[in-house]
Image (tube, rainbow, N blue to C red):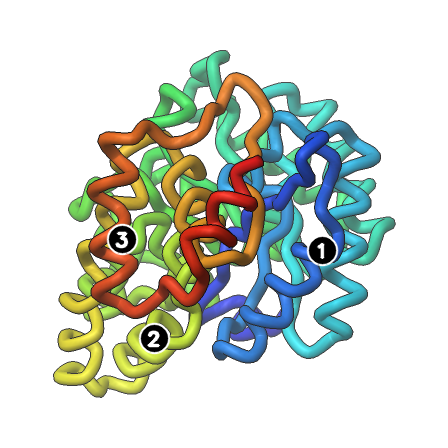
Amino acid sequence: MNTSLFSGVTVAMVTPFTHNQTIDESALRNLVERQIEGGTDVLLACGTTGESVTLDSDEKERVLKIMLEQADRRVPVLSGAGTNDTRDAVRLTREAEKAGANGILSVGPYYNKPTQEGFFQHFRAIAAATDLPVLIYNVPGRTGANISATTTLRLAEIENIIGIKEASGNISQIMAILRERPDGFLVLSGDDAISLPLIALGGDGVISVVANEIPGLFAEMIHAALANHWDRARELHFRLLPLMEINFIESNPIPVKAALAMMGLIREVFRLPLVPISEKSRTQLLPILEELKLLEITAAAYAESLQ
């Protein structure tokens, strides 16, 4: 299995909504084009940043199909297909495969807080249910439980489990995976701000939030690091770091969708329980977007996007 197809920059795409909270298909197609033109390597549909937990099954399939149609095989498209019920995760995985996804991102079960053996059996069942490549997603800050390095390395022996999106923030744990992983097993940063140091340690790329806002420069940064062009990678890292950090001033994807609305690319519409960004956070986000020259619309156009 050619795992290199999923290295580099994967963007965890937002799901744009219309004013009545249906999927904004035109905006989504435009976002896909912007990513491909910017040099993004892989697209992820229906991840956390895509508000997957508030999309029903039909909507998830529609988002995936739009992205596949618009990408037109120019880049691979992953589908978020994880949940905390293994049977339902298997169902979602099979549906994504049937819809044409090129691979699966499957988050660690949340709320249940399984044991390490439970994690292993969960992901083994998902892998057995599909021929697609499967990426594990470890994000204990959201799920409430960590997938250990030992468990990850056990799962890495399963043929179609091809890598992990590591968002634990535990550098020692990630280094242990990097040190012991089998050939071809991908380690992708789940945190934009530490993607550069993880690549320096041997990581293979990132599944990114900030790429939604600034795909070109962020892709250049990651590709420079992967090519060992460290001076350029560091320069871009520190230039983009304020945006990477402010994207988490409130729960993701609130800030990134606010930024994209300010840029005139989507409407600032969420599904509850997410709500628009606070005015305090908005005033902190605006100057960072201005500094990076990302604001290309008038105040009137932005105000219209909020209506």
Q: Are marks 2 and 1 in contact (CB under 8 Å)?
A: no
> Which of pointers 2 and 1 indicates the residue nearer the eye?
2
Q: Viewed as shown, does residue 298 lie left or right of 133? A: left
Is there any visible trace of residue 189 in the rendered image? yes
Where residue 59 sits in the image (x, y, percent)? 78, 37
Dot 1: within a 10 Å radius of its alpha carbon, few (fewer than 14), some, or many (20 or more) residues?
many
Residue 11, above or below 36: above
Where residue 134 sits in the image (x, y, percent)? 61, 51
Which amino acid, by three-letter code, is at mark 3? Met
Which amino acid, by three-letter code, is at mark 2? Leu
Q: Earlier in the sequence, mark 2 or mark 1?
A: 1
- Viewer-closest of 103 and 35: 35
Find residue 217 and name its label.
2
Residue shown at the point (57%, 35%) measured from the top left: 307
Name, please, the residue furthest toward the front.
Answer: 300
Residue 31, above or below 220: above
Name, please, the residue furthest toward the top.
Answer: 112
For marks 1 and 3, give the CA distance. 31 Å
Q: Say which residue label 3 marks.
A: 244
Which amino acid, by three-letter code, is at mark 1? Leu
Where residue 42 sits in the image (x, y, percent)? 56, 66
